[in-house]
Image (cartoon, rainbow, N blue to C red):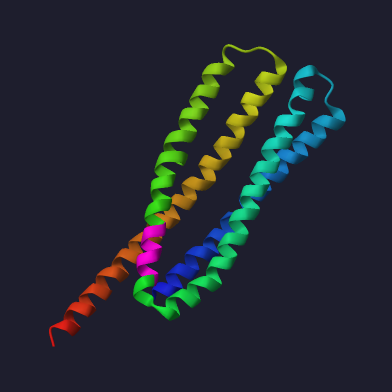
Amino acid sequence: MDILKAATDWAKDELVSTPFFILAGTLFLAISFGLWQVGKTDLARAYIVPMLVAGSLLTIIGLGLFFTNKARIDQFKIDHSENPIAFVEAELARTNATLLEYKNVVFTGIPVIIGICVGILFFVSAPRWRATIITSISMLSVILFIDGLAHARISEYRQQLLQEQKEIQHNNGAEESF
């Protein structure tokens, strides 16, 4: 198995995925601008700032992930050429930490926050609070959706790393027996 190709393919797939954060952020910003221009009710005007904040956050997340993964592609080549065994170990550690973060933050924390927001929504009637809570639920849902797909990709990549680690250990064991 060519683990460098697998790592590069994973990072390239992430480069395709991260613009969806930017797209969602741009949509939130467009909604904010549209409501600023044509919103006449208190509720419509209350959405302007929360949508602006959510759109900015999603755009920043997308840009940060894009540039991080773009730089990672070149770094993969360097790290793999220097020491393939250390590369696999480092990538396994990184993917394990990322998967744990997905479990704790994305698949536990975000749904809990969404649930709390839904619960609060029943008790507030002020337009600003309703707009903030509904925008928060929307933004967190976008993050949950995109990160759910990213979780599947990194989980598959981790399996490839584990397979490569087994092959390395098997090859090292065969060399030591001579």
Q: Residue at x 52, y 18 (%)?
A: 119
Q: Residue at x 77, y 30 (%)?
A: 48
Q: What type of secondary structure mainly makes up the magenta span?
A: helix
Q: Is residue 68 magenta?
A: no
Residue at the location (60% across, 33% down)? 138
Q: Which residue occupies 42% across, 35% down?
A: 108
Q: Of 12 and 57, which appears nearest the observer?
A: 57
Q: Quadrant of the C terminus?
A: bottom left
The vertical placement of 8 against 116, above or below, is: below
Q: Is residue 124 left or right of residue 109?
A: right
- Residue 1 visible to an observer of this rendering: no
Residue 178 as seen in the image, left or right of residue 78: left
Of all residues, the one furthest to the right in this rendering is 37
Q: Residue furthest bottom?
A: 178
Is 34 above or below relative to 65?
above
Q: Position of residue 157 (x, y in %)?
A: 40, 61
Query: In the image, residue 22 lies at what x, y percent?
Result: 67, 49
Residue 173 visible in image: yes
Location of residue 103 in the rendering, given as x and y in whole percent from the top left corner: 40, 42
Range covered by the magenta-colored residues: 87-94
Up-down relation of residue 141 to residue 178 (above or below): above
Q: Position of residue 139 (x, y in %)?
A: 61, 36
Residue 84: name its quadrant.
bottom left
Label count reads: 0
Q: Left or right of 111: which side holds 53?
A: right
Q: Quadrant of the N terminus?
A: bottom left
